[in-house]
Image (cartoon, rainbow, N blue to C red):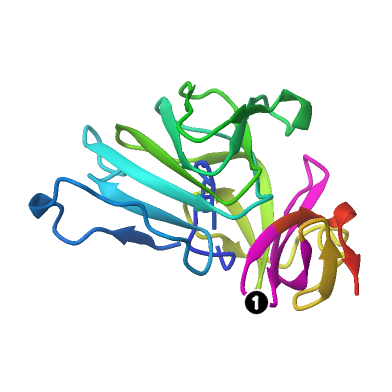
Amino acid sequence: MNLLRTLPAVLFLASFLIPGDAISQDDLSAHTVVPLHEFSEGQWVEKVSGDATKPGDPFVIRIHQDAGYIVFPHTHPIDENLTIVKGIWALGMGRRFDRSALVMMELGSFGIAPRNMAHFGWSKTDTIEQVHGIGPFSSVLLDPVFELTPQGVTLLTSLLLPGTPTTSNPPDCFPLKMNTRVKGERGEGVIIGARCSPYNQMTQYWVRKANGERFWALVTDLKPQ
């Protein structure tokens, strides 16, 4: 679930990505309590305990996602044990994103996405999802996703790893460009990134408002200003 410090990156659900660097706690051996962190710039994955990439290692991570973010269909090699610790998130099963299949997960809800089962998600609000399990944990997109960043377009195959630069994205993927001023249901601001899934026939844009708040919206829900 693209789990990322960026667009210029997440996840997922492992956003997945998201879209980057993991944030570690200082010397976990000296702590028994790891408090929730407030959102910082970008979507990111927070390393709480253990190493999610290490086989046999128990791990806990937190995935921070902005409101409106759609997690495109993906799979994990292990069961994903997911608890909502901030906001309202939604989980759905299937190989194609289907809003009608989403099941809302309120604060404190627990869900499981079985290993190798295709699933997707949506952040109704700013959310933090806490994921735990026994590594290795990865988040593999079922179909390629293209990401628009200030540095250009990248191709994503994972929600947890950076994309690779590409110039072969479909020409209709990003009808709106970086820094375009737009307005949607959540307000207005400038585009700071985007993700396009040709298979799902969907492009979502990342927008920053004048007050610094961020949200995601489908291109069909935005109007250039």
Which x, y percent locates residue 134? 28, 31
Using the image as rendered, state which of residue 15 and residue 122 is in the foreground.
Answer: 122
Q: Quadrant of residue 208?
A: bottom right
User: How many residues crowd around disc 1 within 10 Å: few (fewer than 14), some, or many (20 or more)?
Assistant: few
**Up/down of 40 relative to 200, above or below:** below
**Residue 188 sits inside the magenta stretch:** yes
Q: In the depicted view, which residue is nearer to us: 207 or 37? A: 37
Report which residue position mark 1 lands on.
150
List x then y, in percent, for residue 215.
68, 59
Image location of residue 12, percent across then percent down: 54, 46
What span is colored magenta in the figure?
187-215
Residue at horizontal 76%, vertical 78%? 179
Q: SS at mark 1?
A: loop
Which x, y percent locates residue 119? 60, 29
Q: Is residue 144 above or below residue 180?
A: above
Question: Compared with residue 201, is residue 117 higher up or lower down, i.e. above or below?
Answer: above
Residue 117 visible in this rendered orientation of the protein: yes
**Residue at the image point whose x is 83% and y is 60% from the top:** 184
Amino acid under label 1? Pro
Query: Within the image, what quadrant is residue 137 found in?
Result: top left
| 129 relative position to 30: left or right | right
Looking at the image, is 21 positioned above or below residue 54?
below
Work out whether residue 98 can be spotted: no
